[in-house]
Amino acid sequence: MDPRFDTTMRILIIHRYFWPDTPPYASMVRMIAQSWARQGHEVHVYSSQPSYKDSIDIPRQPVRQHLDELEIFRCRLIPESKKNIPARVLNSMFFCLGIILHAVRRGRYDIIMSSTMPPVLCGWAVRIASHLTGAASIYHCMDLYPEVGLYSGMFKSPRSRLFKLAQRIDTHTCDRAAAVVVLSEDMANTLCQRPLRHPENIQIINNFNLPKFGQEPAPDIPEWATPQRPFRILFAGNIGRFQGLETVINAAILLEDRPDIEFVFVGDGTAIPTLKAAAGSLLGESVFFYPHQSLPVAETIMQRSSACLVSLQPGIYKVAYPSKMMTCLSTGTPLLVMAEEHSEIHRFTREQGIGMTCPPDQPNQLADTIRSAADHPEQLAEMRGRTAAVFQQHFAFPAVEQKWSELLEELENRLEPRT
């Protein structure tokens, strides 16, 4: 530990959804927090009660909880659902106000790390809390807001007043942060298109595979986990509007003459009714939908699949990076990446030889890619043989943990001596 410090650093990590809640970052941030705690730092987490998915019932957690080396604080919010927009807006405001009050009441933190949930507002609240308490801040951008809003339809144009206001607020947050962490070069390039005063503070640290935290493989793996046809394309994750899955359904229709190929979608999301309707007579024949599964079950399904689909609608690669990619590779399963050729995820998959690639919104090309893979199982076997080494080098937790430790050490050396 740096001799300027009398004890350890006090670190506050903030995310609206924390383990045992279900979004990937809820588990990832626990791993990061525990890593820092094992290095001797005092780590607190500020979050809320599990509420990410209405369809998953998670027991209420203690308001204040000691979890291994961590101290968890969960704020009280009003009941909400995905469809109750006013309640979600109010909860975002309550949560951000709680961040400021918690940071001030708990005394001095040396570092406060926040994510982009709630978008823009969380970073803004941490900026205020850091100013009031003298803490350095890490802004962990799992997605880039408000730019994501241009693809989701939240903003009609980058010239809209609301978009400009949100971007101005978020840019100030980035400028005040000691470090801004993004997941890819593409995201860093997008961020640098803003008028940032300190682009040198941008750090690229990608995600790692989801931890299980002692979960054992489920004793009753569902029968459908075993492919019904020789070649299975699996999509596991949120089935929403950012994945461009209509293209996959259209490719399935083009492959209707291939009785050896099937498509399986595992997860929840708003796009499921539309996709089922588009599948038509293929639904239940070569196209299947199943609900969200626990991580051990999902990994078993991945291992038994021919390829895991990682798809993004056009432009999304600039503002986000799919965390499911790491979990897929951890199971040794080749990828089928549907993203622009100039995107980092497309280039990485091709350069490492760990999967197939094709551009988005091209169902004919996607169908040809899948057909070729099914016809050449020896090439898929070679890809499968390379995934383990690539995963260990780039996405296994020890490799990513080292980058987080280096960032923390760098910030520690920049901090003013504690008085």
Image (tube, helix red, strand yellow):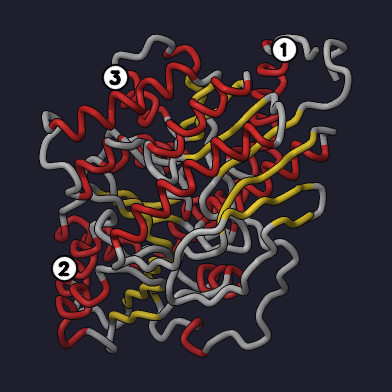
User: Element at badge 1?
Assistant: helix
**Which image quadrant is residue 239 in?**
bottom left
Kindly identify which numbered label has been placed on residue 413. Answer: 1
Q: Name the one closer to the observer, 39 or 206.
A: 39
Q: What whole-number distance in Å separates the C-alpha atoms at marks 3 and 1?
A: 28 Å
In the displayed structure, 199 sits above or below 282; it is above
Crowd class of label 1 (few under 14; some 14 to 19; many from 20; radius 10 Å): few
- Look at 22% across and 79% down and name the residue there: 276
User: Quick check: 105 left or right of 277?
Assistant: right
Nearest the eye: 63 or 233 = 63
List x then y, in percent, for residue 25: 54, 50
Q: Secondary structure at mark 3?
A: loop
Q: Which residue is mark 3?
A: 194
Q: Is residue 31 above or below residue 39?
A: below
Residue shown at 54% from the left, 46% from the top: 15
Which residue is rendered at x = 45% and y = 63% of the image? 78
Which residue type does callout 3 highlight?
A: Arg
Q: In x, y percent, where is residue 342?
A: 28, 33
Badge 2 is on which residue? Answer: 250
Position of the N terminus by quadrant: top right
Q: Amino acid at mark 1?
A: Asn
How crowded is the residue under tag 2: few (<14 C-alpha within 10 Å), some, or many (20+)? some
Foreground: disc 2 or disc 3: 3
Query: Tag 2, which secondary structure?
Result: helix
Q: Nearer the viewer, residue 23 or 294?
A: 23
Q: Residue at x 53, y 55 (%)?
A: 17
Which of the marked residues, 2 or 1, is nearer the chain's N terminus? 2
- Type of residue at label 2? Asn
